[in-house]
Amino acid sequence: MTTPTLDRHAPTIGLESRPVVPEGQAPAMRPGDRRARRVLWWAACLICGGLVGLVLAIVGTLRGRTPSRLRRGVVVSGTAVQLASGGSFAVAGADGDGGLWETTRMVVNAPVSGAALLYGVGKGGVVHQGGNGTTAVVLDDGVVRAGTMFGTVFLTDQRMETDSPRTRRLAEHEAQHADQWAAFSLAGGPAAFPALYALDEAFFPGAFNHFERQAGLDDGGYDTPSDCPSIAGRLTLVSLGLVTGSIRVARRRLRGPSPAATGRQDFPRSAS
């Protein structure tokens, strides 16, 4: 008795399936790399935009928004320039023997201070270290008024006599400006204070400027005006407020009420 022959198929070996990455597409980042890039981005936004920039960067990241190439380029370039300028100030002109606030002020103002120090030294200025954590650079020209504070570096054309009471009072006045630079830079980046100062100066020039008043008019060499604060500046601000309000009201009237407010709903028309 013969047994029938059973036909058996040869076993097939399945190939391991791997995800195919299209050409030109970068492989997915690891979670650790993604976190590191996120932290670096937040740090760059903090350097360029202060605490406001950091908050906006964190909110954008949590919402899944990806910054544009232009924004990334501006932030990265600004961060690189500020780190280089701050490093030059740390090497050439830093004096960190003060307390906690003076050290914090020096670090926050380092990018602006470094740029001002490089400018002053490049023009042949004489550097004087102050006892309140500030640095004065005496120049022959290229300064505004009797001098201007940039971060913690004071560019001036006045001869700085150490034992002079006038010099000590001026140094305290400029130290107040250094505090203002640090506070607003920490809040909104290094461009915050000069922008606000210029805006205030446009409406309240000279001795009417609120930042100068806070730093001390007498110590800064200003004569206190009789009508301080400036009535003209207040009238200008009120006028701008009225103009802005009128423009907004006019724009709303031109737009007309929204469909939701009127209770009407527009339906698409059918083709005839």
Image (cartoon, rainbow, N blue to C red):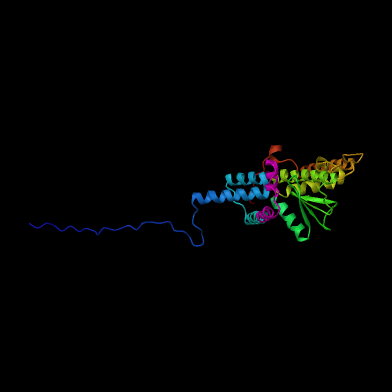
Residue that appears at 40% across and 56% down: 18
Magenta residues (range):
83-109
In the rendered image, the residue lying farthest to the bottom is: 23
Residue that appears at 81% across and 57% down: 139
In the rendered image, the residue lying farthest to the right is: 226
In the rendered image, the residue lying farthest to the left is: 1
Along the horizontal axis of the image, is 233 left or right of 193?
Answer: right
Q: Is residue 228 above or below residue 45?
A: above
Does the magenta segment cover residue 90?
yes
Which quadrant of the view contains residue 256?
top right
Q: Position of residue 3 (x, y in %)?
A: 11, 56
Does the magenta segment cover residue 61?
no
- All told, the count of numbered labels is 0
Residue 269 seen in this snapshot: no
Q: Position of residue 227 (x, y in %)?
A: 91, 39
Of 24 and 201, which appears nearest the observer? 201
Residue 106 seen in this snapshot: yes
Along the horizontal axis of the image, is 63 left or right of 126?
Answer: left
Q: Position of residue 89 (x, y in %)?
A: 69, 54
Secondary structure that dominates the magenta span: helix
Q: Position of residue 70 (x, y in %)?
A: 65, 56
Along the horizontal axis of the image, is 142 left or right of 189?
Answer: right
Quadrant of the image containing the N terminus:
bottom left
